[in-house]
């Protein structure tokens, strides 16, 4: 098979890009369609693929990244609750008493704890990303260590926040 006409031919869902069709025969195009072209080599795409995330073993850095995104969503939803509490408490003395009564509930304390833990995790993981932007912890081992540090510091923050709210 003549691959001289193929240069940087990434395949996205079976579609060729950057292929000089005049140098490839119809047979070679169809045979290339059954394979991926990765950095100049052909790899069979019929290999087994498992995309069930529940059965995949992800590295700790992946869990840290997923948790960072989840904490961002928690903050998005939690800010609405916190802004309602702030608005109600500042509106009047009766509103302040309403927020105090609401915060006496264990469910409300749990919601506030959950939002504050999300904020703490997001801030700690954000500092980790800023350090990585500065070149600290960019290696595989550094990334793993950084993720472990983020999880430990977040656990400490969660316990501290729970102690503060009780």
Image (tube, grey):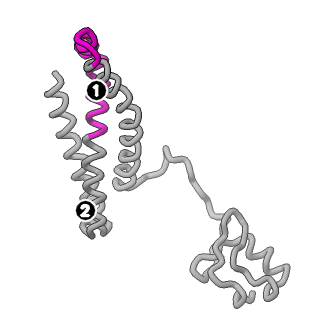
In terms of image quadrants, where is residue 89?
top left
Q: Residue at x 72, y 72 (%)?
A: 16
Query: What residue does disc 1 label?
Result: 112
Label the magenta part by its dominant secondary structure. helix
Residue 62 at x, y = what percent?
39, 54
**Sequence-earlier tag: 2 or 1:** 1
> Tag on residue 122?
none
Residue 2 lies left or right of residue 87; in this view the side is: right
Q: Position of residue 162 (x, y in %)?
A: 19, 28
Q: Can you give x and y, in whole percent of width and height, for residue 99 in the image?
A: 27, 15
Secondary structure under tag 2 reads helix
In the image, taking residue 99 as reference, residue 57 lies left or right, namely right
Secondary structure under tag 1 reads helix
* Number of the label disc, if any, that sits on residue 131: 2
Q: Is residue 130 left or right of residue 50?
A: left
User: Does 134 sit above or below residue 148?
Assistant: below
Q: Nearer the viewer, residue 148 or 162?
A: 162
Q: Could one spot residue 104 in this view of the protein? A: no
Q: Quadrant of the C terminus?
A: top left
Q: Which residues are magenta?
A: 91-119
In which image quadrant can residue 26 be found?
bottom right
């Amino acid at each position: 098979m003549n691959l001289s006409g193929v240069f940087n031919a990434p395949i996205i869902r079976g579609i060729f890009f950057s292929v000089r069709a005049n140098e490839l025969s119809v047979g070679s195009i169809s045979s290339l369609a059954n394979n991926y072209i990765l950095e100049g080599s052909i790899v069979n795409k019929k290999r087994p693929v498992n995309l069930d995330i529940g059965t995949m073993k992800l590295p700790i850095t992946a869990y840290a990244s997923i948790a960072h995104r989840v904490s961002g969503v928690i903050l998005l939803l939690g800010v609405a609750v916190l802004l309602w509490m702030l608005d109600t408490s500042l509106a009047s003395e009766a509103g302040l008493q309403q927020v105090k009564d609401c915060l006496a509930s264990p469910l409300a304390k749990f919601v506030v704890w959950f939002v504050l833990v999300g904020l703490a995790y997001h801030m700690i993981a954000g500092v980790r990303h800023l350090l990585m932007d500065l070149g600290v912890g960019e290696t595989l081992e550094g990334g793993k260590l950084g993720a472990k540090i983020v999880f430990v510091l977040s656990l400490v923050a969660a316990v501290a926040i729970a102690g503060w709210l009780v």
